[in-house]
Amino acid sequence: MLPFDIQEYQERLQKTKHRMMENDIEVLLITDPANMNYLTGYDAWSFYVHQMVVIIIDEPQPLWIGRYLDASGARLKTWIYDDNIIPYPDYYVHSKVYHPMTFIGEILTQIGQGNRNIGVEMDSYYFSARAYVKLQQALPNAVFKDGDLIVNAVRIVKSDQEIEYMKKAAVLGDQAMHHGIENIRIGSRECDAAAHIYYNLISGTEEFGGDYSSIVPLLPSGKNTGIPHLTWTDRPFEDGDSTIIELAGCYNRYHVPLARTVTIGNPDERLHQLTPIVQEGIAAVLDRAKPGATCGDMEEAWRTTISKYGIEKEARLGYSVGLGYPPDWGEHTASIRRDDQTVLEPNMTFHLIPALWFDQYGIEISETLRITETGCKTFSKYPRELIVQHPFLLNQHGGEIS
Amino acid sequence: MLPFDIQEYQERLQKTKHRMMENDIEVLLITDPANMNYLTGYDAWSFYVHQMVVIIIDEPQPLWIGRYLDASGARLKTWIYDDNIIPYPDYYVHSKVYHPMTFIGEILTQIGQGNRNIGVEMDSYYFSARAYVKLQQALPNAVFKDGDLIVNAVRIVKSDQEIEYMKKAAVLGDQAMHHGIENIRIGSRECDAAAHIYYNLISGTEEFGGDYSSIVPLLPSGKNTGIPHLTWTDRPFEDGDSTIIELAGCYNRYHVPLARTVTIGNPDERLHQLTPIVQEGIAAVLDRAKPGATCGDMEEAWRTTISKYGIEKEARLGYSVGLGYPPDWGEHTASIRRDDQTVLEPNMTFHLIPALWFDQYGIEISETLRITETGCKTFSKYPRELIVQHPFLLNQHGGEIS
């Protein structure tokens, strides 16, 4: 049932404890669902209620604490002993009176952890301001420490098994990109292209199916391609439209993002001019990406290349990627940006997305890459090009799905 | 471009300000993406970085503050004047050094709001513990107040236009349920059923397309139907399997959830026995749901009915539903549970999901309902039954989508 050997989970736990010691943390409360999954295998859409995995520095097993009706999922999906799965009653859910962190504080006190150095993930989506306040009230003798990104930092270097899952995710992403682009024609709507993307991401191949990705397919189109985080509408595509597709194949919650830009009919002259610049910039970054170089070096390779053409880019170029849950597939550790001193190591993985956005148009051509022993390799096999689509649907059965 | 008249947004803003006054809040910082959308129209997948809408009690227009590359989306998608859209630079994103709440605190100080009573959404997913700490540091002269659920409380009664969007969402949900169930056969995998659900939710009808729902389709199957929040795998369906599908049609971010239970071949005897009990319980709740009754009354109608058969249910029966963003389509205000004293009013909408989960099996049959002037109406037209599926795929082209 578990996607990794128990030994791999135990190694992750040891690395986490090592970082806890470096940060003088005795008890780490993990609320980021990706970190919960990484250490225990837990995987369910239950993160809309408060829940956590607790790592105690001198205990061999984590604890899972969550809503009682999710506890059976924790028993099924993790390597944690059943005794270490602690459910809270349903009246704590979305209540004006009760808060799950009060319950959790009481449990930690009962098991003798209430007076220790307790690390919390301060900027996790799933550790709210109130969660912090309630926990502090419930644990007046604890010393709270910033435990943010401790597990994320362990996640940055992937195991070979994780890389295998990302290779499968890349297959899913490539086929979804293919079918999405195939449905960007006159006679089709943005929602039709998005539906084909989803179908292909999830039905997968005959050998394996796909998982939901942490971000939905992004599909800014027409005059909005300068606005990267728009989702689809039901607007019909028009001749001359350009559309950006950013998606990720996802397998066992491991993501390989990919972005491409498509035009219907002849591309806008500006896109035509930008494409070789972006291609040259990406090639320069891939050439620079190798063990010992830094994320900042990758950014410099890009900047040096595009500045020859008088172009600047403010936004970061990319970020560490892999395991994730909504709302983000980024790992929130290394960014490919100026001054990021993260030193590259084999099996680090990044989404390199040196997109250029302007007022009325934009271009995205991205690659997800893995640092190898000697350089780097991209996951996707999709052509690194501006895609120019014949206006009319060649593939008429594209709309007929039951 | 906006899904509602500006007048409707202004009415929502007035109601919000009224509640701010009741709570002695002069400045409300809104970080819940559904609340941001509700008051301004803002809609993009940008909530994985810190962003907010600011309501100042004595200013006619909200402010939008977010990442600079999302500001163009705010200009496009909201009724806010361009001058009220305030971008922060990209180096604030996922940085170990800079935090967006520091920037936001400085802006609030500059515009003379730094010494006021400031409400924050204490239990919002997108207002982290660190966001709160950084904001307090940046605004030492402010008095912080709990502004959680202030806008959600306004959202609980829908306008007629919101109800129209929910009716469209119901059409999407029904067709997705139909095609999902159609693909629960021997020869199909859980991921294939999920892919068909997604395709139909999003491609929609010829008249309108669908939006992504805030929770992915949940699909616990086989021995796991007692674990409600599991997502699909690529396991092939087997004869005798039961599967629960919980999904929501979504239109303009308005959700109508729907759950059904399907068996391949003859149902387990226990499901067969539970079905009429659940049906009777739902009918009793729908009969009790009318203006003037409370959420607690609805729960009592259910409890009285099922207790005749010796069954108890710990989890709440349902919750207020409508506008939403991941990770939840529930509104976090009223719950259909014992002691919830929310008085029902016309155009309140609830997902009634009186599911029963046991160790190795479970049943979910749900309805989303609207309180009318005299009673209530359900949105879905899907038969309220346990669905018994012939084992083999009748619909062989179901797998052939491009």
Image (tube, coloured by chain):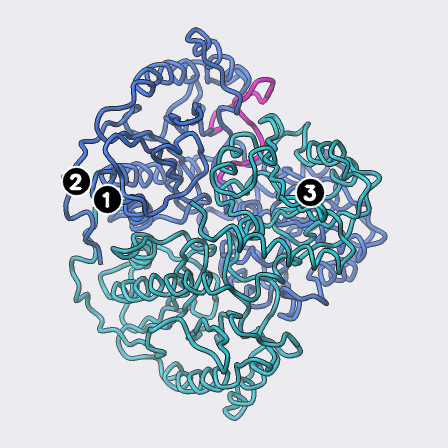
Chain colours: A cyan, B blue
Q: To which residue does mark 2 refer?
A: B393
Dot 3 falls on a residue whose secondary structure is: loop
Measuring 46% from the left and 15% from the top, which residue is drawn there? Answer: B302
Residue B393 vs residue B123, the one in the foreground: B393
The type of residue carrying mark 2 is Leu
Dot 1 falls on a residue whose secondary structure is: loop
Residue located farthest toward the top when viewing the structure as drawn = B308
Q: To which residue does mark 3 refer?
A: B122
Residue B224 is left or right of residue B154, and the answer is left
For the residues labelled 2 and 3, say whether their Cβ atoms are less than 8 Å apart: no
The mark total stands at 3
Measuring 29% from the left and 51% from the top, which residue is drawn there? Answer: B203
Measuring 67% from the left and 33% from the top, which residue is drawn there? Answer: A99
How far apart are the two marked residues, 2 and 3, measured between alpha carbons? 49 Å
Q: Which chain does the numbered disc 2 sit on?
A: B
Residue A294 spot, x, y in % from top left: 61, 79
Measuring 49% from the left and 28% from the top, which residue is drawn there? Answer: B348
Q: Which chain does the numbered disc 3 sit on?
A: B
